[in-house]
Amino acid sequence: SFRIAVFASGSGSNFQAIIDHIQEKKLDLSIELLVCDKPGAKVIERAEIANIPVFAFRPKEYVSREAYEQEIVKELQKKQIDLIVLAGYMRLVTDTLVKPYYGKMINIHPSLLPSFPGLDAIGQAYEYGVKVTGVTVHFVDNGMDTGPIINQESVIIEESDTLEQLENNIHKVEHRIYSEVIDWIAEGRVQLQDRKVNVLPQKVN
Ligand code: GAR
């Protein structure tokens, strides 16, 4: 089966959506590891409930980013991970992770990139006053939210929307499209050439 590691720092609603998706659809995918840089985060409880092994660490206890990323790479190799899924992992990743996993590591970001990269993208878009924002799923490179784009979906901001309503609308889209992209990749349908991503049509028998 196709083996996934999820990296997360916070509440883990995207992590949960992926767990639920795999269970409902009885897919040949398994989440073999949660990597978390915040030992108190709610996402860890979700992993424990779902019986998913956790590698939790405190970045400050390492001499460098490279040092903890090397530990992570060891864990990923032990578990023979096919795909890394960043789901609210609020840290930049460096070449230590990007080199061995380029094309095998994806991220979800709550805006239409390249607009509003970085922290609090939903708030940034709301404050800016854009009428359309959305969600982006992309391969990870060593920039901040800069890698090749796999899929995007727009979300309209209505004049009556509060920030909280917009957040809800964005999260609903995230929870649906992240699992979709993971399915495409597990089915071998996503091709990456330079910055261009090509999604092959579903096979019909
Ligand atoms: C999600 O909205 C995700 O797109 C965002 O963090 C949230 C995590 O929520 N990620 C970023 O902003 C990355 N730059 P969750 O912990 O409930 O899945």
Image (cartoon, rainbow, N blue to C red):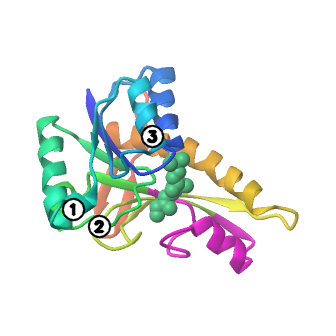
Mark 3 to mark 2: distance in Å? 24 Å
Ligand 1 within 8 A of label 3's CB?
Answer: yes
Question: Does 167 appear above or below 125?
Answer: above
Looking at the image, which is closer to me, 6 or 60? 60
Looking at the image, which is closer to me, 70 or 201? 70
Mark 1 to mark 2: distance in Å? 6 Å
Q: Residue furthest right?
A: 160
Q: How many marks?
A: 3
145 inside magenta stretch: no
Residue 90 on image: x %, y %: 41, 60
Mark 3 to mark 1: distance in Å? 23 Å
Q: Which residue is mark 2?
A: 141
The disc labelled 1 sits on which kind of residue?
Answer: Val
- The tag earlier along the polypeptide, 3 or 2, is 3
Q: Which residue is mark 1?
A: 98
Q: Which residue is mark 3?
A: 43
The disc labelled 3 sits on which kind of residue?
Answer: Val
Do the numbered discs 1 and 2 sit on residues whose CB atoms are within 8 Å?
yes
